[in-house]
Image (cartoon, helix red, strand yellow):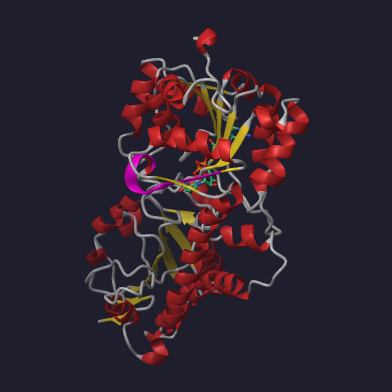
């Protein structure tokens, strides 16, 4: 295979030949980061190109993948696809990022780009990958950034970094930002067909190569942006739109008691007009995307951006609002939250996804404890030690009814909660953050909806 290795950037082959080389296993691909998004992406690349090495710093992840197994839960079709691609020799994994970089022509980066405590994008993992790529970079290689980065990163960080450390000159390798527009639980579908793929290169040739690659990966349209920075902005704009919109829904939900209406009902009806698309209120906004991306923009822009920051403040205030609502509802029924036993349902930030970064459950638990409640927490997606790390006592769902509870806060409605035997409890006070509970025979306050009979 090595003698047939085909570069793509400024390649001698005509485009049709490049496409064939890509399909026939002559374009080795390295995917750096085999997490919830990286593993599905690597598996799809393997199906298309037949030659992918996945790189991860986690030995367990690498071992699992090489065994043809899938460490990412609740991702339809992924265990089968990983098994199939490993079996046919199209996908393997390694911790040796430099060796992977030396063999690869296409380098796909999909590692975490979190927010630091001082609200700056933390590009440490990203830069570690760039170091490895620089060591193995060859003329004709293409670097594809899929993980979310601040605007300007491809042009101002990736290109100069690789050029300075690799010895390969600027006109010999390509760089494009091609954002992951995928949600956990439907990754394969999203990667291969759900939405148009956005690609933006640091130059026209990079955009051309990225477009060629992704026209093989997705059955959907490939949209070529004018440059990489615009593509980086697209991903961030999607996130801040949702953050600001959810903040609007949350602010309206906070006004519910004064208005004396069901704000959710009003939102649903308002949204029947095509220019209105107000999102749903809740106990807060979590995960490693929406709550972080506003700072990816504000950290790179000198202009004031009060709307983005106010939206963040509103959404960050919702866990406290939610816990305080339980305190008020308990008081309304003559009970004191101090000394009460309260269960938090759902510690992950989203139903069905084992992800706790920036979860609103953390703020809810903290506030309930500040009020003097004894806090239990149930999450079928998480191990007990993870739940305990948030300061709550972990309880198995099957054991919930054996506890004498005064209150419940539904933060994240996993489908497993549909089976709770609510009748087993005496006179509960429940705050439903997402409005998913039906008639359960207890006093329920829905965030935005208000008290249910
Ligand atoms: N999860 C989502 O819904 C989603 C959606 C859109 C975009 N994204 C983007 O994708 C990125 C990755 O998301 P994810 O959900 O796959 O994260 P994840 O935390 O599930 O996985 C990240 C993986 O990268 C590995 N890793 C960390 N540092 C590494 C390094 N230096 N070299 C190689 N591997 C390394 C980790 O061990 C882990 O397996 C996010 O940071 C975000 O920018 C995620």
Vertical placement of 395 versus 270: above or below? Answer: above
Residue 310 as seen in the image, left or right of residue 210: right
Front position in the image: 368 or 439? 439
Front position in the image: 299 or 16? 16
Look at 69% across and 60% down and name the residue there.
299
Look at 28% across and 67% down and name the residue there.
437
**Ligand 1, image quadrant it occupies:** top right
- Label count reads 0
**Does the image show residue 200?**
yes
Q: Residue furthest right?
A: 164
For residue 325, which quarter of the picture? bottom left
For residue 110, which quarter of the picture? top right
Vertical placement of 115 versus 261: above or below? Answer: above
**Does the image show residue 336?**
no
Look at 34% across and 28% down and name the residue there.
81
Residue 120 as seen in the image, left or right of residue 373: right
Task: Confirm whether the magenta stretch covers residue 195.
Answer: yes
- Residue 121, position in %: x, y? 66, 52
Q: Which residues are magenta?
A: 191-200
Vertical placement of 106 versus 401: above or below? Answer: above
Task: Confirm whether the magenta stretch covers residue 54.
Answer: no
- Residue 363, position in %: x, y? 54, 65
Quadrant (top left/top right/bottom left/bottom right) for the C terminus: bottom left
Residue 134 as seen in the image, left or right of residue 270: right
- Residue 53, position in %: x, y? 51, 22
Residue 126 as seen in the image, left or right of residue 260: right
Look at 61% across and 46% down and name the residue there.
113
- Residue 331, position in %: x, y? 43, 84
Front position in the image: 257 or 96? 96
């Amino acid at each position: 295979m090595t003698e047939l290795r085909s570069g793509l950037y400024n390649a001698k082959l005509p485009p049709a030949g490049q496409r064939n080389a890509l399909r026939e296993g002559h374009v080795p691909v390295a995917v750096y980061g085999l997490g919830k998004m990286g593993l599905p992406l690597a598996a799809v690349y393997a199906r298309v190109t037949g030659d992918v090495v996945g790189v991860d710093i986690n030995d367990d992840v690498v071992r699992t993948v090489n065994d043809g197994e899938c460490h990412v839960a609740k991702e339809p079709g992924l265990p089968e696809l990983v098994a199939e691609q490993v079996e046919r020799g199209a996908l393997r994994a390694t911790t040796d990022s430099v060796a992977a970089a030396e063999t690869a022509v296409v380098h796909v980066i999909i590692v975490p780009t979190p927010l630091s405590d001082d609200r700056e994008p933390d590009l440490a993992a990203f830069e570690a990958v760039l170091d490895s790529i620089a060591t193995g970079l060859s003329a004709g290689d293409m670097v594809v950034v899929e993980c979310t980065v601040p605007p300007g990163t491809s042009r101002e960080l990736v290109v100069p970094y690789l050029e300075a450390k690799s010895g390969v000159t600027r006109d010999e390798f390509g760089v494009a930002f091609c954002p992951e527009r995928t949600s956990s639980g439907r990754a394969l579908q999203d990667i291969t067909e759900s939405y148009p793929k956005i690609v933006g290169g640091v130059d026209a040739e990079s955009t051309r190569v990225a477009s060629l690659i992704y026209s093989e990966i997705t059955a959907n349209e490939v949209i070529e942006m004018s440059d990489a920075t615009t593509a980086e902005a697209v991903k961030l704009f999607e996130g801040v739109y949702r953050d600001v919109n959810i903040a609007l829904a949350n602010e309206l939900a906070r006004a519910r008691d004064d208005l004396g209406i069901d704000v959710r009902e009003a939102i649903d009806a308002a949204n029947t007009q095509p220019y209105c698309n107000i999102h749903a209120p809740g106990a807060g906004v979590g995960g490693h995307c929406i709550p972080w991306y506003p700072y990816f923009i504000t950290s790179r822009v000198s202009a004031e951006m009060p709307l983005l920051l106010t939206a963040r403040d509103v959404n960050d205030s919702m866990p406290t609002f939610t816990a305080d609502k339980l305190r008020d509802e308990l008081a309304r029924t003559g009970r004191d939250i101090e000394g009460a036993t309260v269960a938090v349902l759902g510690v992950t930030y989203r139903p069905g996804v084992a992800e706790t970064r920036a979860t609103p459950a953390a703020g809810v638990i903290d506030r309930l404890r500040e009020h003097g409640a004894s806090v239990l927490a149930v999450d079928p997606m998480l191990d007990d030690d993870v739940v305990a790390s948030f300061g709550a006592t972990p309880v198995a769902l099957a054991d919930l009814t054996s506890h004498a509870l005064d209150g419940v806060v539904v933060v994240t409605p996993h489908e497993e909660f549909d089976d709770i035997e609510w009748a087993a409890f005496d006179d509960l006070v429940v705050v439903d953050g997402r409005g998913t509970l039906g008639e359960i025979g207890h006093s329920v306050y829905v965030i935005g909806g208000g008290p249910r009979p």
